[in-house]
Image (cartoon, helix red, strand yellow):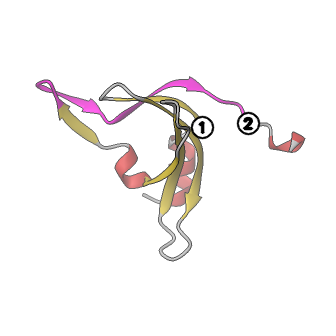
Amino acid sequence: MELKDAVNTILPGKYRCYMGGEIEVLYVAKHWETGDPMVVYRKLNGDDEILVRPAEAWSETVEHEGSTVQHFTRIVSVDHNWDDA
C-alpha cells in the first residue's frame, strides 16, 4: 500500500477490533527507514497505549466465529483542525 492510498483510506477516528476492543487512529505516518505507511493509534481500554501497525495489515480480514470480517471497522470519525495547533 502506498502512503497516499493509506492516508486516503485509513482515516482518523474510532475503530472497533473484531475481538471487541476499541482504538483511535491518530495518524498515518511513514516509516523512516523503509518508507512504508504505518497507522499510529491509541488503545481505548484505559491504558491509552500508543502503538503503530503497518497500514498494509490494517485493512486485512480475519476468520472469526465462522465468518470473514474486517480486523478493524471504523465507528466514529474525528475532525482534526491542524490550523488551530
At x 32%, y 36%, the residue is 71
Q: Nearer the viewer, residue 22 or 46?
A: 46
Give the overall secondary structure of the magenta segment.
strand
Q: Nearer the viewer, residue 60 or 44?
A: 44
Other-residue count near label 1 (Cα within 10 Å), few / some / many at <14 / 14–19 / ≥20? many
Q: Quadrant of the C terminus?
A: top right
Q: Position of residue 29 (x, y in %)?
A: 58, 57
Q: Quadrant of residue 8?
A: top right
Which kind of residue does numbered mark 1 sit on?
A: Pro
Which kind of residue does numbered mark 2 sit on?
A: His
Q: Residue 18, relative to residue 43: is it above or below?
A: above
Q: Position of residue 66 (x, y in %)?
A: 11, 25
Q: Is residue 69 magenta?
A: yes
**Residue at image mark 2:** 80
Range of magenta residues: 64-80
At x 35%, y 50%, the residue is 57
Q: Position of residue 33 (x, y in %)?
A: 51, 77
At x 57%, y 49%, the residue is 7
Q: Position of residue 72 (x, y in %)?
A: 38, 34
Q: CA distance from mark 2 to mark 1?
A: 8 Å
Mark 2–mark 1 CB contact (< 8 Å)? yes
